[in-house]
Image: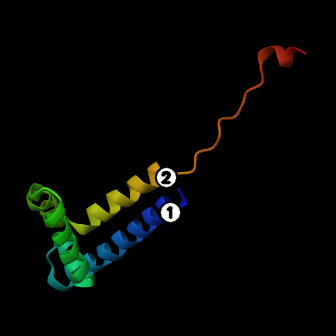
Amino acid sequence: MFLGRLLGWVLLALALIVLGGDGLRWLESGALDFAALGEVWSRFAPASLNLLQTIVQGFLPSALWDPGLVTILTWPAVAVLGVLGVFLLLVCRRRRPPQRRPRFGALAG
């Protein structure tokens, strides 16, 4: 559970960083255009994106890559990273054990 929460926070931090980059591009160009997940991924780790494509196309059904993952790679990176981060934080949150309430008869004494 700790690793899930940690990954959730990392994804949210990455979403904020990408949002900051999108904001800077908006200030420079005057047009609000969100960077796609595939664009951001290929900018920072192109070898891993190519490796993912090779693995998916080689070992899994071809429909999983195209149109499946290709569609997700065209979505805004802020949205994908943010939604995944919030999802992981909700699924892996700390759950408090239920508190036992005293029985009514125990209070009457």
> Residue at image x 43%, y 62%?
8
Residue placed under numbered mark 2 in the picture: 92
| x and y percentages locating residue 9 in the rendered image | 46, 65
Q: Indicate how the structure is coloured in the image.
A: rainbow
**SS state under label 1:** helix
Marker count (numbered): 2
* Dot placed on the residue nearer the N-terminal end, 2 or 1: 1
**Alpha carbon of mark 2 to alpha carbon of mark 1: how far?**
8 Å
What is the quadrant of residue 105 in the picture?
A: top right
Q: Is residue 54 left or right of residue 108?
A: left
Asked whether residue 51 is in view, the answer is yes
Give the residue type at disc 1: Leu
Establish if 50 lies above or below 74.
below
**SS state under label 2:** loop
What is the quadrant of residue 23 in the picture?
A: bottom left
List the single residue furthest toward the front: 59
Viewer-proximal residue, 32 or 93?
Answer: 93
User: Residue 78's mark?
Assistant: none
Label 2 with label 1: CB-CB less than 8 Å: yes
Give the residue type at disc 2: Cys
Asked whether residue 34 is in view, the answer is no
> Residue at image x 34%, y 62%?
82
Q: Is residue 10 left or right of residue 93?
A: left
Establish if 99 lies above or below 87.
above
| x and y percentages locating residue 34 in the rendered image | 19, 71
Viewer-proximal residue, 90 or 63?
Answer: 63
Q: Is residue 53 left or right of residue 5?
A: left
Residue placed under numbered mark 1 in the picture: 3
> Residue at image x 65%, y 35%?
98
Pointer 1: residues within 10 angstroms few (<14), some, or many (20+)?
few
